Image (tube, coloured by chain):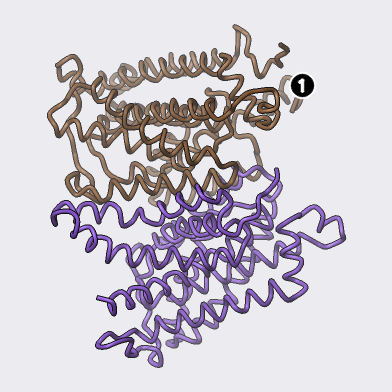
Chain colours: A brown, B purple
Amino acid sequence: MTQTPSQMPAKGDPRIRIALCIFACLAIVPPLLSLVGLDYYTSVVTRMMIYAIAALSLDLILGYGALVSFGHAAFFGIGAYAALFLQTRGITDFFLHLAGASLAATAFALVTGAIALRTRGVYFIMISLAFGQMAFFFFISLSAFGGDDGMSLSRATLFGQELLRSEVTLFYLVLVILVVIFGFLCRLTRSRFGRVLIGTREDSLRMEAIGYRIMPYQMAAYVISAVICAIAGVLIANQLQYVSPTLSSWQRSGEFIIMVVLGGVGNLVGALAGALLTIGLEEALARFSEHWKLWFGMLLLAVVLFSPGGLTRLVERVSGRITGKGDDR
Amino acid sequence: MSTLLLLQVMNGVQFGILLFLVAAGLTLIFGIMDFINLAHGALYMVGAYLMATFAATTGNFWLGLALTLPAMLVLGLLLELGIFRKLYQRPHLDQVLATFALVLITSELVKMIWGAAPLNVPMPESLSGSVPLAGPMRFPVYRLAIILAGLGLALGLWYVIGRTRLGMLLRAGASNRNMVSALGVDISRLFTVVFAFGAMLAGFAGAIVSPILSVDPGMGDSILILAFVVIVIGGVGSVRGAFIAALLVGIIDTVGRIFGPMLLKMAFDPAVANQLGRTLAPMLVYLLMIAILCWRPNGLFGRSHAK
């Protein structure tokens, strides 16, 4: 088998190194923030990491499988509502919440995937959007959970203890989950499964011609992605201590896509960096202007129009220019 | 019961007509340019806001409408020449992102200019009454006028697309862009025309709906997604499909919200039926879309795109 370097990263993959750097930087954030007395920002960074998990999940199907899901926030909402549901039933254990969310997300993904994965391209975008809206309206109709307004909940318990009350514990829990999921997705995308998925992205017809049934692979990726996004949903419910239908609005799905594409699709680190950057940017812009969405939109438009391939490509190009290697793609 | 049903069907038709006006431009842009435009709902919203402003400053509904339409045409032209033109050759993902950015920009700009509070547009005197429908039921003249205007536009579109040279190029462009281009047609000018016209149709829909709906910054999103459902059901690129699907979606959505809970009450006890009805009614159109896609993956009138 011949593999180009970009498809089969070697041991010293720079992207892994970048990711490790990011994780190391994140790990020292809470003590650093409490040192300078900005404890509040711990929860902002926690939120960044939760979104990074969601963005990673989307990158699996969008970046590696070329399935542009515009309804991914449905799974985010499913995770959050699963946590809320179990919490109101008196089940407070965090891991049980994860299990419940995973089950619900798997079920929804199997049903929607069976229909959506029959379609391609623009149709897939629109059908996933429609499924996302279905989930959104479903959550709105749940009057027992506050309908439109949503509902607040207390944080889950860890090993029977209320450890997550502390922002710092929650922070490290999210960080650990982020690292585990990142590692898992790195391995997955390099495995045979991952390479088949990349094959379907590059040329699904050819993959079928050489004897693969691509549907099961896409379905598996879709379900895995759904479960990971639902895990992010459980985490956001715990972080915000509030669950509302807007968690699965179509704008949220759009935000996920922005994160992945801004960072650069199909290499995981891009999604990670993109999510951290997007939420960071939103926070910063919101501080500087009430109309931050305007500036955010302008920036996004400029990036899409003038720097196709996202920020990683931009960085590559800039660094290529500096080292004199030039643009290799 | 049956007159109530008739009334709701009429309301559904009126809603469907609106959906058609938005979806027609979207499906043309989609079919011919293979371009996914999330900002189309924003154009609908801008149409409504322009109408609110022009109607208020001129004090006349018709003058307001007469000013809104050319303004939307110009806006469409500017957007096409300034932004969209650069995106046709890009992957769908870039189109999604760029137009999503436009949604953010327009909804925020609208909030900055007009504020977040809903606006009202007064109904024109001449269309403010109601006509008897059946028995004691009456139907507002204005809604009837929307239906008639939409039907007129649909007929016009059918004529332009089916009978004129421009329409011939549109149909040819939708089935094979490259071939049309190779035969010496200036396809980019065709795109500009279609886009500007689509923007005007969406703006027109927003303008005429403004007297019966409140004009608010969220109005574009809901119609956009329903318009997507319409063009998926109708088949991408097919205006005829969009027309039929729009009526179908409009009627099912409107009638389902009223009669769904009633039907459910016959089978379940009221509390359950209420919750079920609230849950199912907004989902009906999506369920319809899924059912139709299972039956015909390319929509009712969609051609299978060999890709």
Q: Position of residue B229 (x, y in %)?
A: 48, 56
Q: Which residue is mark 1?
A: A324
In which quadrant is the N terminus of chain A drawn? top right
> As displayed, is residue B138 above or below residue B306?
below
Residue located farthest toward the top when viewing the structure as drawn:
A11
- Residue A165 is left or right of residue A282, and the answer is left
Q: Position of residue B238 (x, y in %)?
A: 62, 62
Q: Nearer the viewer, residue A35 or B199?
A: B199
Residue located farthest toward the bottom when viewing the structure as drawn:
B126
Q: Nearer the viewer, residue B130 or A217?
A: A217
Residue B56 visible somewhere in the drawing: yes
Q: Quadrant of residue A280?
A: top left
Q: Position of residue B33 (x, y in %)?
A: 68, 55
In which quadrant is the C terminus of chain A drawn? top right
Going by the numbered disc 1, the residue's amino acid type is Gly
Residue A272 visible somewhere in the drawing: no
Q: Residue at x 33, y 84 (%)?
A: B139
Q: Dot 1: few (<14), some (14–19), or many (≥20) neighbours within 10 Å?
A: few
Subunit ID for the residue under disc 1: A
Q: Residue at x 34, y 47 (%)?
A: A136
Q: Quadrant of residue A34?
A: top left
Q: Position of residue A323 (x, y in %)?
A: 73, 19
- Residue A115 is left or right of residue A84, and the answer is right
User: In the rendered picture of this protein, how many numbered marks are placed on residues?
Assistant: 1
Q: Secondary structure at mark 1?
A: loop
Q: Nearer the viewer, residue A7 or A215?
A: A215
Q: Residue at x 56, y 42 (%)?
A: A119
> As displayed, is residue B168 above or below residue A120?
below
Q: Quadrant of residue A321?
A: top right
> As displayed, is residue B293 above or below residue A208?
below
- Residue A247 is left or right of residue A161, and the answer is right
